[in-house]
Amino acid sequence: MTESDRNKLEKLLDYHLHLDDPRQRIQTQKLLAQDAQAQKLNQLLEQNFGHLSLLDDVEPPKNLADRTLDFIKNHPQVRFAAEKTTATQATTHSTSHSVSRDIDRSTSRSRWVLSNLRDLVAVAASVMLLFAFVNPGLKHARQIAQQQNCANQLRQAGMALNQYSLDNRGGMPFVERSPQARWLPVGRADEQNGANTRNYYLLVKQGYIKPGAFLCPGVDHNNIRFAIKVDPEKLKFRQDFAGDIQVNYSFRLILHDQPLQDPAGAAVPIASDRNPIFANFDSQNQQVLDLNENENLKNANSLNHGGRGQNLLYSDGRVEFSPSRVVGINPDDIFTIRSVTRYHGTEKPKSKQDHFIAP
């Protein structure tokens, strides 16, 4: 690897681990846009960081140090040396000069074992210290990998939407619904189900995308993935996702047939990590959700990535991770309808600029 490649790799590592400042971040983005070698290195990094998402977070036992010391002290070699030392010291005055030499050798052996004991303790302490330093870094890298994998899945959804649009005169997937149908109850099997997710389930039914693509890598659902893998053919006969177990994303609310691309040419948000406001709303059979009574929901980010932010899919296929749910030139909270604080699940956006992603 040349010096130039090493410099590029260092910049990309800082970029992926968010160790760079805003100015360096812009420089790295320009590098990725212009340099083919940097693009190859970046692709390799994304592939390797992707493996980190398969690792589980493991907390070290709180009594690890005590257990390590107990193990060493009770090791047969250590006990034998201690017992030998005690026995030889007790018989020092009743033995010959040759036995005295054995005592010296035994004592020397004991000192050797105890010296190694101190070394082992030092190594154990060093390993624990190293773990304390490295584990947060690995956890952060794992979080970044999950965000990237999530972004890749939303890009797949964006490509599926674009292909559907090309096949359907530029429109978004849309299922006819009754005027007062609730857009909230994901997974209801009745024909009049008005859940917003039912529109996007058309992408699965018509083969534009696999159902597993709607499970965010930041959420623990290995068993769900397995269940989907077992018999995907059954999914074609459903009207909607089977509930939260099959979808971790939220989508722009569609109440009528409309185009994918904004006529004004603006890129608008059409999907994101799951809306935190309605995460438990319908499952608790609530009739009304009042945000004034749930102040913590007013500024909460998606739970998919531990509240750090959410990936947003835009109508032009772009995906960005935003630490805030308020986006756009004219700031808009994508998880709420403007000026609405009480929700029954039948509310409608106030205007075309009110981009409501739900549920």
Image (cartoon, rainbow, N blue to C red):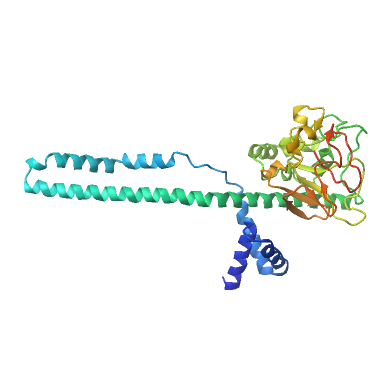
User: Is 231 on the left-hand or right-hand side of 49?
Assistant: right
Residue 287: quadrant of the picture: top right
Residue shown at 88% from the left, 31% from the top: 192
Q: Nearer the viewer, residue 340 or 318?
A: 340
Query: Does residue 24 sit above or below 172 in this rendering?
Result: below
In this rendering, the count of numbered labels is: 0
The percent coordinates of residue 85 (x first, y second) are 19, 43
| Viewer can see residue 186 | no
Query: Does residue 165 sit above or below 247 in this rendering?
Result: below
Q: Nearer the viewer, residue 197 or 202?
A: 197
Query: Does residue 155 sit above or below 348 in this rendering?
Result: below
Quadrant location, the C terminus: top right
Residue shown at 53% from the left, 49% from the top: 135
The percent coordinates of residue 214 (x first, y second) are 74, 43
User: Is 4 on the left-hand or right-hand side of 325?
Assistant: left
Quadrant location, the N terminus: bottom right
User: Is 136 on the left-hand or right-hand side of 329?
Assistant: left
The percent coordinates of residue 127 (x first, y second) are 44, 50
User: Is 117 on the left-hand or right-hand side of 317?
Assistant: left
Q: Nearer the viewer, residue 69 or 216?
A: 69
| Viewer can see residue 260 | yes
The percent coordinates of residue 44 (x first, y second) are 63, 60
Residue shown at 76% from the left, 52% from the top: 155
